[in-house]
Image (tube, rainbow, N blue to C red):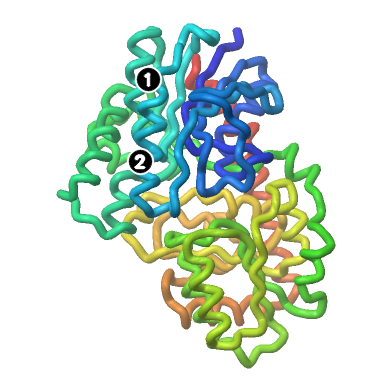
Amino acid sequence: MSKNIWIVNQYSGSIYHGMNYRSYYLAKELLKSGYKVTIFSGSYSHLFTSYPNTKGLFTKENIDGIDYIWVKTPKYKSSKSIGRIINMLIFMINLFFFNTKSILKPDIIIVSSLSLFPIFNAYLWSKKLKVDFIFEVRDLWPQTLIEIGNLSSSHPLVKFFGWFEKLGYKNTKYVVSLLPNAKKYMVDNGLKENKFIYIPNGINMDEVKKFEDIDDDIKQLIPKDKFTIGYVGTIGIANALEYLIKAIKELKGYENIYFIIVGKGSKKEKLKQFVDKNNLTNVTFIDPIPKIQVQGMLKYIDICYIGWKKESIYKYGISANKLFDYMYAGKPILHSFSGEGDIVKLAKCGISVEAENVDSIKKGILELYNMQKKDREILGQNGKKYVLKYHTYENIARKYMELFK
């Protein structure tokens, strides 16, 4: 019998609003199996490219069969500002005012981080409505604050986040981790071993099959006679693109290699300033494109790039959406990563080099550039086969439905 699912994910967007897409894609697949899904999301996210039209504290909207409840939240200046913390807190506080009797009672609640604060709402709702909740962990907070944000483990914000994290681990039916190696960390923080479930990110087949080509004005920015290396995604602290840009400077003499960086984020302006200051004429920055055009963009790129910080937190693994987009496009990947569970190595779909190492990134670029075209094509096809086998949202939804029983 089909069930009614509530998903509480403050930063859940859609293909019409921008990232984050996981809850939207999961809901779409659940609908195909007869489930009813309601997503609670905030009205503002720095990753949205288009904002929902809201009126009052809660705005209901049906998007592709999914019932969205947009919870009014304030804007903030940047992803690392105090305003974002306030935004998270207000989302949690406003949920206390939601009348749970105004919509169909859930059979199960999924609460997805980040933010951690709605775990409290899900916990209280689960008690009130006598249903279980599943805690979906996309990134490890507050551990990320310690290792990426350089905060002390005794910092009040870390302690505050940690309280919500432990509340989730202690009271959830299951923790669904997007990170394959996070079990020990979670058990050390109060999770029972049999509650850990690994369900990674992936691709939505309906979308990648029906992708749109990029607009003509964007096509004109991409040289047709160059070897192109591209990045499509957020340009933030964790993406460590400054090391790629420094490697580009080292490759200044290679006139046939061209770099395309698509997206927005807190580091974009500084990277553009570095490019301008060093007169790097082989780099083009492009504003974010609609999700449905990502595969259209990747058609014009020879090599896809993704990088990370060199931090111990990545020993728990990674699950970046852009990796799976790259793999489905059949493009070789240059992966600047020093953690565990390297998907590029597992799938044999590219070259992995040390994170934050400009010389290694440069050598990786040249290795792929000098490689025979047929060998690059083999790497690309390896990635496509791997993602189709392990990382479609059809498979992801099927794993979730097993947890609903």
Say which amino acid is labelled 2: Ile
Q: Residue at x 62, y 48 (%)?
A: 49
Left or right? Give the position of 272 relative to 134: right
Q: Residue at x 37, y 20 (%)?
A: 96
* Mark 2 or 1, nearer chain start: 2
Q: Is residue 300 visible?
A: yes
The residue tagged 1 is 96
In this rendering, the answer to whether 370 lies above or below 232 is: below
Q: Position of residue 398 (x, y in %)?
A: 59, 26
Left or right? Give the position of 141 relative to 351: left
Q: Residue at x 75, y 37 (%)?
A: 206
Q: Position of residue 306 (x, y in %)?
A: 54, 63
Q: Secondary structure at mark 1?
A: loop
Q: Position of residue 212 (x, y in %)?
A: 80, 49
Residue closest to the far front = 56
Say which amino acid is labelled 1: Phe
Q: Is residue 192 visible?
A: no
Residue closest to the far left = 154
Crowding at label 1, few (<14), some or many (≥20) Cα neighbours within 10 Å?
some
In this rendering, the answer to whether 49 lies above or below 270 is: above
Left or right? Give the position of 14 relative to 75: right
The residue tagged 2 is 86
Q: Split into 4 quadrants, where in the image is the N terminus?
A: top right
Q: Secondary structure at mark 2?
A: helix
Q: Residue at x 51, y 20 (%)?
A: 6
Q: Position of residue 268 (x, y in %)?
A: 53, 66
Q: How many marks?
A: 2
- Quarter of the image holding residue 252? bottom right
**Residue in the foreground of this view, choosing between 1 and 289:** 289
